Structures are given as structure tokens and as C-alpha cells.
Image (tube, rainbow, N blue to C red):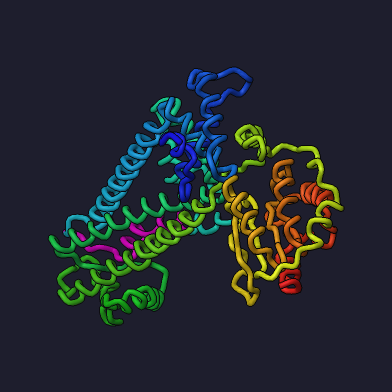
Amino acid sequence: MPAHNTEHKRPPLRHGFSDRWLAESVRLQLPRAGKTPESFSGQQISSAESLARAYDGGPEARVLRWASLLAVHTDLVQAMHSWRQRAGVVLALMLVLAFAGGLSAALGVMGRGNEPVNVLWALGALLGVNLLMLLVWLLSLGAAPGALSAGRLWLWLSARFYGREALTLAQSFSGLSQRVGATRWWMAGITHSVWSSALAGALAGLLIALSLRSYAFVWETTILPAALFTSLVQSLAWLPSLIGFPMPEENTIRLAGLIGSDAVLQTDEQRRAWAGWLCGAVLVYGLLPRLILLGLSAWRLSRSLARVRLDLHSADWSALSQRLSPASQSLGVTDPAPDLPVTSRQKRGSGIAGHAESVVVGFELDDQISWPPVFGESAIKARYEQVMSRQQRTLVLQQLDQSPPRALLLVCDSAQTVDRGSLAWLGEASGRVLHVAVWLAGKGTENRRAVWRQQLQTLGLLENAVFDTESDARQWLEAHS
């Protein structure tokens, strides 16, 4: 076989978010009303479908292969590379501007050193807006992500003014992210990154100002008792003191409320205590929470993106998925497989007495169905096989002929539509074993499961040998192993 043909048939080990992002972008450039868009010619589309149809792998793998073949004829791949570069540049600019803003705010709050610094005003100016926005973000966790956020601004700036491809990529990116709940977490990641940069700038500004100028620190009030300020300062100092920041003594706090503008009354040791208190509060109550939330958002985002799959049963993909399926594996609704009456399977299996260990076969399972199943770790002695290609179909049948098992459990994806080719293979496999059952795994609807049961009855499988739950399948396997 020529090398280029084997290349088309060799399935990748694993598809990532970028592959599905590209496929969604290609789909968005397909015609909406039956005419071929300028991006693709009819010959290009036909050729891509033909090559994808010959590609070994599951339905999603063929769709992703189709998208990669069509993307070669567009600027989408280059646009995706450019979009990522622009997104990185936009994010870097936002971080630089946020850092500069925090730095300027801190220098402005501290002043030139010719006037005492009101510690509570300074702390409120540096952390007030941040804490308010953090509270708003925490309260919004149960609602849809807001349109006004640093994450939305980043996405808008990344896609704006760069042509149709960039807008298509942004639309497909948002669609995939929203489907798996990743939108909240990439928006949160950008938002926390920007605020972390701003607070880092504020902390840097404090350190610069305190290093180059001498400041006196005071607090002032007209109606509130001095004990309130003492308790507040000591309470705020407790957590930073655990990591080494100084806690102003009660006498230092009391004196700061009495000296007014007479900075001479404050000693250098007292000034350093107040400076440490202010820096510690900005770090512990401002920067560190944002960094922790940034790490949490990055972790949740990575987990969400790992779950991204194309919804091949949606109206957007179902027709294409059927066209890309090989003729013997059509995903469309089909007639029952001929020449497979009930007596046929019973006749072939009646003379078989399997002595080998039981076999569990996963038949064209979606990536979202874990394999092997959980009961593979139990005491059940069984061999686990997975069928995703025509070669694997043939190999499994040969293994069943060479060493008939005690029992055969066929695990099928209930979300798929049973077709003539699949039903014929299931009939061949079940005809080689005396004890056989089917577990309808996945998230298929009740109607689709009913169709599966009706079609499996034509193979001679009784109703009590078709299971919807893992526990029922495990019990059957234990009883026949």
C-alpha cells in the first residue's frame, strides 16, 4: 500500500482541544443554505470526505481528520497560530498596564513623604476595589459568566479587527468552552491574572516608596473610639505576622492616633513596623488570594478542556458523521440485519463449550465512556478487548474462534444508532459463544435504547441479557465466569 494511504489510515493517539477547535471553525465556514462557500470547492469537500471515510478510528476521529484536510485549503491554521500570538500579546499588554496602574496607585497613595500617611486610607485605596470585585466574583459563581470582565475584554481585543477567520475562531472557541463549562474558568483565569499583576504593581510601588523616602504613619477619627482602630490593626496584622511581617504594638498604634502631623514623634522602629504592616496586608489580603484563585482557575480550566468532545449527535454534526462513516458502519437508522434469525444464533452457539476466561468487548465506544470498565479491577477474571476499526473486528472474531470464552459481554455505546454493519458483526461475535450479553453503556436516550433492544432481539438475545447499568452487567459476568 502506498505510504500516503497508510498515513491517512493511521489514527492519532489522542486528539486535543486544538483539533476540536479547528473542526468547529471549519464547520462554521461551511455553507448554511446549500451552496459551497468560497473557502472550499466541491471537489475539495468530496476528497476530504473520501479520505476521512477511509480513516481508521471512531466517528469523532474521522470528523477531525476531515476538518484537518479541509483546513489546509483555508487560512484557518495560520489564523489560529496568529490568533494565539495576538491573544498572548493582548494578555501581556493587559498585565503590563495593570502592573503600571498598581504601581502608580501605590506611589500616589504614599505621596512625597512631606505629609504623614493615613494607614487605613492607604490600605483602603490599595485593596478596596480589589476586595469589592473579588466579592462580586464569588457571588457570581452560581450565575452565568458576566459580559463585563477582563476575560471578555481579552477575547474581544484578541479577535477584533483581524478578519473573518479571527472572528470564526473566537466564536468556535467560545462555543466549545461553554459546552463543557470552561468559559467561567478561562474568564476567571484572565481576571485573576490582571488583578494579580495590579496588586503586584501596588506592592512593588510600596516597596519603592518606602525604600526611597521616609514616611510617618497615622490614623485619624472624629467619632469612633480609639480601641476600635487598635483592634482592627491588630486583627489585620495577625495573619501576615504568621509569615514574618511585624505586628505594631498597642503603644505604637495608640501613638499613631495622637501625633497628627507631627511626624517627629514617631521613631524609626515604629515607622518600619507600620511599613511592614501595610506591605503584609497588601500581600496577604490582596495578592495571595488572587494567586490562589488563579491557580484554581487554571486547574479547573485544564480539566474542563480535557473533556471537550464534538457532539456528533447534534444537528451541526450528525449528517456529516453519517457521510463519513464507512458503508458497513453507517450511523444512520437502518433496517434490521438480514439472515440473522433467532434460531441462527442459538444453533451456532448450542454446540460451543467455552473453557477460556470470559471476554469483555467494547464496541466502538465514545471517548467519554471510560475503558476498561470499573469492574475490570474487581475479582472477575476476564480479558478486555476494544473494537474501533475493521481490522480489530476481524482480529476479535479470530480470537473468539481460536479460544471460545465461557461468556462474552459486548459493551455498546447506547448513544450511537445501531446500523446494519454493526448489527451483523455483533451477530457474528455472539454466534461464537454460548453465553452472551450486551451492556448498553453511555448516555443514550430511552428511545435509542429501545431501538437497540429491538434490533438485538433479532440476534437471539433475550431481554434479560441486555443491561443498562454497570452493576447488572457485572452481576451477569460474575455468574457466568
Seen at 30% across and 69% down, the residue is 280
Front position in the image: 397 or 195: 397
Instruction: Return the x and y of residue 174 as percentages of the image width and height.
Output: 51, 41
Rendered image quadrant of residue 73: top left
Rendered image quadrant of residue 207: bottom left
Residue 265 to residue 435: above or below: below
Instruction: Return the x and y of residue 231 as percentages of the image width and height.
Output: 39, 78
Instruction: Return the x and y of residue 244 as percentages of the image width and height.
Output: 27, 77
Front position in the image: 342 or 140: 342
Given the current orientation, which residue lies at the most extreme left position?
212
Instruction: Return the x and y of residue 370 as percentages of the image width and height.
Output: 59, 59
Residue 99 to residue 291: above or below: above
Read off the magenta span. 114-134
Residue 122, magenta (yes or no): yes
Q: Is 191 left or right of 396, judged from the image as shown?
A: left
Residue 202, magenta (yes or no): no
Q: Is 20 left or right of 248, judged from the image as shown?
A: right
- Note whether residue 226 is visible: yes
Residue 330 to residue 389: above or below: above
- Note whether residue 187 is visible: no
Question: What secondary structure predominates along the stretch shown in magenta?
Answer: helix
Rendered image quadrant of residue 34: top right
Residue 386 to residue 407: above or below: above
